[in-house]
């Protein structure tokens, strides 16, 4: 059975039609899926429906065999610990250190009191250290996050998600604020996470060429509808035009270069 | 490509123009002094704001002159009044001396006043911490924050002394009314200050933690409070200093005891100017000590965080 399954998911904000329109797909364990589409297409909404940061208007989402819309508050918390999330603007607590931010990923597993008091077990701490080391942040571990570069902040974001022991990591435009160098490092880490740890990665991207390079599968979204769902090699110029509409011209040039190169 | 060329061309044009200006006028200083070079359009000296300003100033001047010329001085010789006041100040501040109490007693009363300030700040801080969380827009629903913010704004609009007098109706003049009234005002002041400190943490950060399964209390204690703790402390210290000044005044006005009451007795009852001077110096010394203390602590905190 698939790890994540969406069936006819629809979302209307303020009764307007339709941020998401009848979206269905399923994702397996360890898959690396990119969601591409113009801005306003509904990519962020789609990701947020998966961990119920946004409530879908209708349809059914099941994660790891649990139908998420039916869960109680307590069970939803438990489900969310299984779903990591990283963001374009990192969303770290800037005035706290790297290790403190990473340990925040464990709060969902704790009772309210243990979390309030910040009682992290030795095991949790050593896991956090290990993950920080894998992401190459050992030198920054006690630095405040506002002293880090964008790429380093995003790696802290990844570490915070990984320390949750997630089955899925949702990434909402993780490289949109980064320079090409830092972007490559982040995407390489995400690629390794899906390959070596078997964690499913679902990433919203703006850049088609990055999606082509890293994904096992690409889902193209336009105006809330899935207009493409398949392997990167099946993505044609015509389909990019379908996904991006009038924005597509410069993107198609990139695709041409790929075929040439 | 074309765009780049266009920019280069445009930049060159501007440079040429500038250097030709320089040729003609030899320096930039002249460029700004000569009137015929660049026409910025008519400069309005009297726009609406400055007209309004001038009218107000003129009005106030006339009013002041009228006031002084029609003031009924009765039999007071103004010049003598000034010199007498000056002589009083001289006795007060150049010959301070405490007659009616020992230094130990004075110190004890200072401690009473400090205690009053400490207690009211503590009560205010604890209650305001809770209210501040509910008044912060990133932590509570909009209706709740508006309700609390409006409520504390009304409390804050009424001065501390008035609250003390209002509570004195029920509790009688004395330390109880002073504590309740001062705490009341401290709560509203600190609620506003705390909630604004909490709002410094972006809502999206809180949502990120929610998405990982953390709950509200965990986020408050692990993210919101730790990241605003320096602000919280510095607002609390500031309120403590305000409350010390208030406690002195309450000692005099509401009979709450402490050094303020001594000051009131020395000035209003015994007319002992030298003792007033002594107590004033004592209060100034304490205020300076508090200031130094809080600056030190804040400095240390900023270094450690
Ligand atoms: N909180 C919201 N309230 C109302 N409309 C929203 C909200 N969030 C997103 N939308 C609308 O939903 C559509 C999809 O937005 P979004 O999912 O953010 O797109 P993307 O991430 O692809 O840029 C847009 O038309 C946007 O205006
Ligand atoms: Mg988006």
Image (spheres, rainbow, N blue to C red):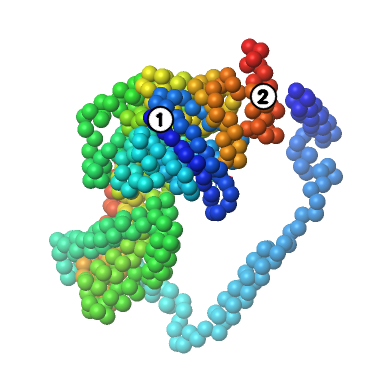
Query: Which sits in the foreground, B151 or B230?
Result: B151
Residue at the spot x=31%, y=40% of the render? A78
Image: A123 above or below A188: below
Q: Quadrant of residue B170?
A: bottom left
Which residue does the numbered mark 2 point to in the structure image? A237
Q: Quadrant of residue B299?
A: top left
- Mark 1 or mark 2, whichever is nearer to me: 1
Asked if both marks, 1 and 2, belong to the same chain, the answer given is yes
Taking the image as drawn, is residue B275 in sight? no
Query: Which sits in the foreground, A30 or B85?
Result: A30
Instruction: Please indicate whether residue A121 sits to the left or right of residue A142 in the image.
Output: left
Residue B46, disc:
none
Q: Of callouts 1 and 2, which one flags the residue occurring earlier in the amino acid sequence?
A: 1
Q: Indicate the quadrant of ligand 1 in the picture.
A: top right
Image: B112 above or below A78: below
Instruction: Please indicate whether residue B173 sits to the left or right of residue B142 in the image.
Output: left
Element carrying mark 2: helix
Where is residue B288 drawn, in percent x and y? 31, 54
Image: B195 above or below A98: below
Name the quarter where the C terminus of chain B is drawn. top left
Where is residue B87 drawn, in percent x and y? 36, 71
Which residue does the numbered mark 1 point to in the structure image? A2
């Amino acid at each position: 059975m698939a790890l994540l399954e969406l069936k006819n998911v629809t979302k209307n904000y303020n009764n307007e039609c339709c941020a998401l329109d009848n979206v269905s797909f399923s994702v397996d364990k360890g898959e690396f899926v990119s969601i591409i589409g113009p801005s306003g297409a509904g990519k962020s909404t789609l990701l947020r429906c998966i961990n119920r940061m946004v409530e879908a208007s209708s349809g059914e989402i099941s994660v790891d065999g649990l139908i998420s819309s039916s869960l109680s508050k307590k069970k939803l918390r438990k489900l969310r610990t299984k779903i990591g999330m990283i963001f374009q603007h990192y969303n770290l607590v800037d005035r706290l250190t790297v290790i403190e931010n990473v340990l925040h990923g464990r709060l969902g597993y704790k009772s309210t009191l243990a979390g309030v008091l910040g009682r992290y077990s030795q095991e949790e701490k050593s896991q956090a250290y290990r993950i920080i080391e894998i992401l190459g942040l050992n030198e920054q571990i006690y630095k405040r996050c506002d002293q880090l570069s964008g790429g380093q902040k995003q790696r802290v974001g990844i570490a915070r998600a990984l320390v949750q022991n997630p089955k899925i990591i949702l990434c909402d435009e993780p490289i949109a604020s980064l320079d090409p160098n830092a972007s490559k490092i982040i995407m390489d880490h995400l690629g390794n996470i899906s390959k070596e740890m078997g964690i499913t990665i679902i990433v919203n991207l703006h850049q088609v060429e990055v999606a082509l390079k890293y994904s096992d599968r690409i889902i193209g979204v336009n105006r809330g509808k899935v207009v493409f769902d398949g392997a990167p090699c099946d993505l044609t110029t015509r389909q990019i035009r379908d996904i991006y509409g009038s924005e597509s011209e410069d993107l198609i040039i990139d695709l041409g270069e790929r075929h040439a190169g | 490509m074309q765009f780049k060329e266009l920019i280069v061309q445009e930049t060159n044009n501007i440079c040429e123009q500038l250097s030709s200006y320089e040729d003609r006028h030899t320096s930039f200083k002249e460029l700004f002094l000569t009137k015929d070079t660049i026409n910025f359009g008519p400069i309005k000296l009297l726009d609406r704001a400055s007209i309004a300003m001038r009218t107000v100033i003129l009005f106030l001047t006339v009013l002041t002159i009228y006031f002084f010329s029609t003031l009924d001085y009765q039999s007071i010789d103004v010049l003598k009044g000034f010199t007498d006041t000056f002589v009083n100040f001289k006795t007060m501040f150049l010959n301070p001396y405490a007659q009616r109490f020992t230094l130990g007693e004075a110190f004890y009363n200072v401690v009473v006043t400090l205690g009053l300030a400490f207690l009211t700040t503590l009560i205010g801080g604890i209650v305001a911490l809770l209210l501040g969380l509910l008044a912060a827009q990133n932590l509570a629903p909009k209706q709740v924050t508006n309700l609390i913010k409006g409520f504390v704004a009304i409390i804050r609009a009424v001065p501390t002394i008035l609250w003390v007098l209002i509570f004195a109706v029920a509790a009688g003049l004395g330390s109880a009314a002073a504590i309740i009234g001062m705490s009341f005002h401290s709560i509203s002041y600190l609620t506003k200050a705390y909630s604004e400190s909490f709002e410094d943490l972006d809502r999206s950060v809180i949502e990120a933690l929610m998405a990982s399964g953390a709950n509200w209390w965990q986020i408050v204690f692990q993210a919101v409070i730790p990241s605003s703790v320096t602000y919280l402390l510095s607002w609390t210290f500031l309120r403590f200093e305000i409350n010390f000044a208030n406690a002195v005044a309450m000692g005099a006005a509401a009979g709450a005891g402490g050094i303020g009451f001594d000051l009131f007795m020395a000035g209003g009852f015994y007319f002992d100017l030298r003792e007033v001077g002594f107590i004033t110096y004592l209060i100034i010394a304490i205020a300076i000590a508090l200031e130094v203390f809080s600056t030190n602590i804040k400095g240390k905190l900023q270094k450690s965080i």
